[in-house]
């Protein structure tokens, strides 16, 4: 099959699935089966794209030209393909998890959930394969809008308030900063096409580029750099499959992916280190890493703790993008994948605990390992990967980030990464350790009456936990794509 056909299939198959989901809304088994089948077919398409890309295949697609040189266009490069592979693999896995969770938790409006879930994934592929900043911006905004109904799924006042924060921060940062930066870039460079080495002409004032860089870093709100991070914990009012989608598959990964694309293909690795603003933004990323970890330690609610953990982990990727050495870029790109599998596993486990025994607080986890050994073992494995210790895949991405920071003379950022790892240990490892070896609270339901989550959810979290181990033993596939980013 031609690359252009495969590329279109990744974006349109989820939308075809939307039609099937709506038509079968009164037949839950068929409806959910359509979602699952669409995910498997899309992943097969992405694998076929990967095979052709690694054999030298290339493609350029233009849907419509708005102005001369400004179009909705799509192309293929290694960072976008890496993002697409992650989304393609995790969509069917998350769908499988959602089938168990949504039914086990007796969630309402399940058809609406699967519809917007599929639209969000289609949008992710459009972002991944965007050939220019204009195309990426359009679908970046569509992703915000189509995930809003997922965040507010419960329909409660708390959910609506969380949705308002989510929409307010993401839209305001995009319109006031991201859009302004993009228009200014167009005015200076005359193009928005992603180009290896950057697009700004020689002689562009460093002060102007510094302002633009700051506008991009803060304007790409989905990357959740402080102080524009509050939307992320606010969105935790959503059902756990949505949290998994936000934190591992779609929204936050779209943010750091966009920031990486801007740093590598709009500014260029030679330009970034020379800008006055770069060092201050690097310090901000380091500060976000440490502060988010400290806040996570203080959160007793498990999803809130994981949300602040995500903020810190995203700042790893932002840090690598701004450090702008080849090793740091490799580390950032690899961390998109490694964090995706580790963090989605942790959210899957949080949802499994909620469905099986209705516990949401870290202080309630003691003794759960006896009743939920599979779930808590998966939580332990994923925690090790997030920390950056063997045998978790996160070991390699953190290694390259540290190595790249040292290469750039950013010793203080190495300290921030190492301190963050210690804090990760402090707020993640006690959860499974207490679950297996702690004494359960006598005031809560006896652990002997508890059980694992529904089988579809259990299978999904085992698959993603296993993948964190696979990515430690076989990281070459991720590394090869990450290493191609620098040409």
Image (cartoon, rainbow, N blue to C red):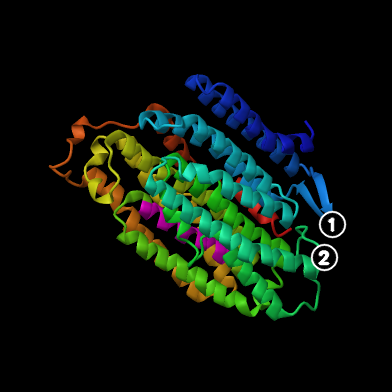
Q: What residue do we see at 74% from left, 80% from top?
A: 205
* Quarter of the image with the C terminus in it: bottom right
Quadrant in the picture for residue 180: bottom right
192 vs 149, nearest the viewer? 149
Image height of 406 relative to 1, above or below: below
Who's the residue at 57% across and 66% down the image?
218
Q: Is residue 444 visible?
A: yes
User: Residue 265: horizontal and vertical position, in percent?
Assistant: 72, 61
Q: Kindly report the secondary structure that dominates the magenta region of the rendered protein.
A: helix
Q: Where is mark 1, residue-wise?
A: 69
Mark 1 lies on a secondary structure that is loop
Q: Are marks 1 and 2 in contact (CB under 8 Å)?
A: yes
* In the image, residue 314 lies in the stretch drawn in magenta: yes
Give the position of the N terminus as an image quadrant: top right
Query: Percent position (x, y) of residue 53?
Result: 74, 43
Region rendered in magenta: 304-321
**255 with respect to 344 (left or right):** right
Q: Is residue 244 visible?
A: no
Secondary structure at badge 2 equals loop
Residue 312: in magenta span: yes
Instruction: Find disc 2 in the rendering and name its residue.
Output: 190
Q: Is residue 159 above or below residue 9?
A: below
Query: Which mark is first along the chain, 2 or 1?
Result: 1
Left or right of 72, for residue 348: left
Residue name at image x 16 percent, y 44 percent: 441
């Amino acid at each position: 099959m031609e690359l252009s056909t495969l590329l279109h299939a990744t974006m349109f198959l989820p939308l075809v699935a939307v039609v099937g989901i709506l038509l079968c809304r009164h037949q839950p088994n068929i409806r959910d089966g359509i979602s699952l089948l669409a995910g498997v077919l899309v992943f097969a398409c992405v694998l076929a794209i990967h095979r052709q890309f690694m054999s030298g295949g290339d493609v350029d697609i233009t849907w419509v030209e708005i102005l001369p040189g400004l179009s909705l266009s799509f192309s293929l490069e290694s960072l976008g393909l890496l993002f697409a592979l992650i989304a393609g693999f995790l969509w069917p896995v998350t769908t499988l998890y959602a089938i168990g969770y949504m039914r086990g938790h007796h969630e309402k409006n399940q058809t609406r959930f699967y519809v917007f879930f599929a639209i969000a994934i289609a949008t992710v592929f459009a972002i991944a394969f965007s050939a220019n900043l204009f195309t990426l911006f359009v679908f970046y905004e569509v992703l915000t809008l189509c995930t809003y109904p997922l965040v507010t799924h419960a329909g409660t006042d708390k959910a609506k308030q969380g949705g308002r924060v989510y929409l307010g921060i993401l839209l305001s940062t995009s319109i006031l900063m991201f859009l302004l930066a993009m228009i200014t870039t167009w005015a200076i460079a005359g193009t928005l096409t992603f180009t290896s080495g950057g697009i700004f002409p020689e002689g562009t004032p460093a002060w102007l580029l510094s302002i633009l860089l700051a506008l991009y870093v803060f304007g790409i709100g989905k990357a959740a750099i402080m102080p524009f991070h509050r939307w992320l914990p606010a969105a935790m009012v959503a059902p756990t499959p949505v949290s998994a989608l936000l934190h591992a598959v779609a929204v936050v990964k779209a943010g750091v992916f966009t920031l990486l694309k801007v740093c590598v293909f709009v500014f260029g690795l030679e330009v970034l280190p020379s800008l006055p603003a770069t060092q201050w933004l690097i310090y901000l990323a380091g500060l976000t890493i440490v502060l988010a970890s400290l806040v996570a330690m203080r959160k007793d609610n498990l999803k809130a703790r994981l949300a602040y953990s995500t903020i810190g982990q995203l700042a790893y990727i932002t840090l690598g993008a701004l450090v702008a050495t080849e090793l740091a870029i490799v580390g950032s790109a690899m961390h998109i994948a490694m964090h995706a599998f580790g963090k989605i596993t942790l959210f899957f486990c949080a949802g499994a605990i909620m469905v099986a025994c209705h516990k949401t607080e870290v202080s309630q986890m003691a003794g759960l390992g006896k009743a939920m050994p599979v779930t808590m073992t998966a939580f332990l494995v994923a925690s090790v990967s997030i920390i950056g210790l063997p045998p978790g895949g996160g070991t390699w991405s953190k290694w390259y980030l540290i190595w790249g920071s040292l290469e750039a003379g950013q010793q203080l950022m190495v300290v921030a990464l190492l301190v963050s790892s210690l804090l990760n240990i402090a707020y993640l490892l006690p959860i499974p350790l207490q679950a297996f070896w702690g004494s359960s609270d006598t005031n809560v339901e006896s652990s002997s009456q508890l059980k694992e989550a529904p089988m579809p959810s259990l299978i999904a979290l085992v698959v993603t936990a296993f993948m964190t181990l696979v990515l430690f033993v076989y990281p070459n596939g991720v590394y090869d794509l990450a290493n191609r980013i620098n040409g």
